[in-house]
Image (cartoon, rainbow, N blue to C red):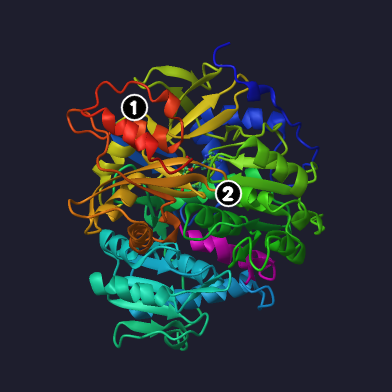
Amino acid sequence: MADQHPHDHDIVTRPAIAMAGTGCDAEQYAALYRRSLDDSDGFWAEQAKRIDWITAPTRIANWSFDPVDIRWFEDGVLNICHNAVDRHVEAGRGDRTALIFEPDDPSGEVRKISYAQLQREVAIFANTLKKLGVAKGDRVTIYMPMVPEGAFAMLACARIGAIHSVIFGGFSPDAIAGRVEDCRSDWIVTADEGLRGSKRIPLKANVDTACDKVPVKGVLVYRHTGGDVAMQEGRDHWYHELSADVSRDCPCEPMQAEDPLFILYTSGSTGKPKGVLHTTGGYAVWTETTFRYVFDYREDEVFWCTADIGWVTGHSYIVYGPLLNGATALMFEGVPNYPDHDRFWQVVDKHKVNIFYTAPTAIRSLMREGKDYVTRHDLSTLRLLGSVGEPINPEAWRWYYETVGKAKIPVVDTWWQTETGGIMITTLPGAHDMKPGSAGRAFFGIAPQLVDGDGKVLADEATGGSAEGNLCITRSWPGQARTVYGDHDRFVQTYFSTYKGKYFTGDGCRRDDDGYYWITGRVDDVINVSGHRMGTAEVESALVLHPKVAEAAVVGYPHEIKGQGIYCYVTLNAGDEPSEGLEAELRQWVRKEIGPIATPDHIHFTPALPKTRSGKIMRRILRKIAENETGSLGDTSTLADPAIVETLIETRKNR
Ligand code: PRX
């Protein structure tokens, strides 16, 4: 067999679990997966029955990847907020807890919000948005801390048919302004301040700075910390004031399945983040179904996804997936290492968490602090562990499985993307053995394919077998993004032009003989820093805005904790000299332009960048130098000035 890999046979037998939840066993998986491909319409029509439709869909799939036009359940009418909230209340489950809020400060007030309360809160929020002037189809920017009101705001938008665009609270005013402008959003929902690890994040002040650049009609401000903020007359409104006299009833707007639900900005290989657009019906079915099968949810269990609602993981597995299933989701405002490195485990015990879903970067950083932080806690309520956001190295996987899970409970390593809406490749806890470092098998309806640089098919589910190549998906699935907001050409160019007729993920991947997929990381100019996706071009654009910077090239390099670190090559304008002071200034500069998550790890001043004679920067060489793999630079004969490579090696930063 081709491409055998030493890890392929590194199997961890699945711990026996009683099939009492919503998951499936190996036989059911095989049958359901087969049917999901052979009788896709029949399969998805059946899954869609778990959604309450105002008008049930009769057309199931209607899509083409060339030309690109993707529709699911297109004649169906529904409201996703009704499905996530109201229908549980109507079914007599209003007393069940929908959200548990654990604040940043461990001695702060825990909030438990039942489905009945959630219905009331969301209706009031929705009426407040209407009072502000928000109407169906309007884009509402949400820049909130991790508090329940962030989820209320999202669901309130969905309730009235407004399109939410959530921006992670760690982004800078410039990043907010760019996103508000791109989707022409007239409204922003924010809070006075956020809290993370006892530090205050000036959310409202950031919005003010953004609005100086890109004015909006209204800003709704939730009072969270009580910190001082400036309120602009006519534009800014306190949520508690504006909502005081609105009605507690707000009907759910009937939405076509293909009506937009939300925009979420994500990074690609070019400078400007893309507004990935998800629509209503397909996303509802996809997040409901993936949550159900992957997490094998049981009545009354507590599910905790540690992501922020500003990322897709928070959208799909804090808000929509769990609530569509009537589950109890924990929302955590803080960080894993405040007040100490055992906060996660303390919270697991405090709230009796059963399913815990986090990112490899968090696992690696906690692993470094030693076992004691974990073993001093009981953790006996845990039944399932999950990982998402970046490849998990087998060592971190084993630590997670053995130290946190006591080698008794399954780990699901879930591969997916902002563009996929929900989980695509994973093991299922009751169905599959696990292989540390492999995401696992294709989820229902997913047809992965590995191709080489020329598009030649190396392996897929039909051919079977092992191979390594670029990961494409050959058919649509309900949760797939439909377009880039306002720029369908860019959507087509980015995802469907590299390999015509296929969705290209941007990831490299290996398939082994058992049908397990091993994601090897991005093959484009996207880097993944602590699970945060970033375009190297974004960091470059930020750097060259500095008056002393002539040119910049940014690459990722392996980083023990963060997965990848940010390595910047910078050339200065004539007359400007490198200095430690300037290095610190540039770091600060990038933080200010994009946000703290984009802070460069290394700034390497260089008199020139290695370029081909036609002027193209040779990133391959820059990557090797940043990775400290200078023995294997490959062919450098096309360089205009080969001597520059020697200089770069001598002065490299990451030793
Ligand atoms: O490279 C893959 C990596 O994260 C990228 C998607 O990032 P984003 O859109 O921010 O969504 C993250 C949360 C779903 C992918 O192209 N990635 C995500 N999950 C995994 C992963 N890489 C390996 N294993 C995973 N489980």
* Residue at the disc numbered 1: 499
On screen, 20 above or below 511? below
Mark 1 and ligand 1: say if the CB distance to the nearest ligand atom is below 8 Å: no
Task: Give, as a three-letter code, the residue at label 2.
Answer: Thr
Mark 1, other Cα within 10 Å: few <14 / some 14–19 / many ≥20: some
Residue 75, position in %: x, y?
A: 40, 47
Whole-angstrom CA distance, mark 1 to mark 2, is 31 Å
Instruction: Decide which of 223, 279 is in the foreground and name it.
Output: 223
User: Which callout, 1 or 2, points at the residue further toward the start of the chain?
Assistant: 2
Magenta stretch: includes residue 556: no
* Residue at the disc numbered 2: 361
Residue at point 38%, 34% (across, down):
649
Residue at point 62%, 51% (across, down):
365
Q: Which mark is residue 86?
A: none
Task: Give, as a three-letter code, the residue at label 1.
Answer: Tyr
On screen, 156 above or below 37? below
Judge left or right: residue 603 versus residue 529. left
Magenta segment boundaries in residue numbering: 78-103
| Callout 2: SS | helix
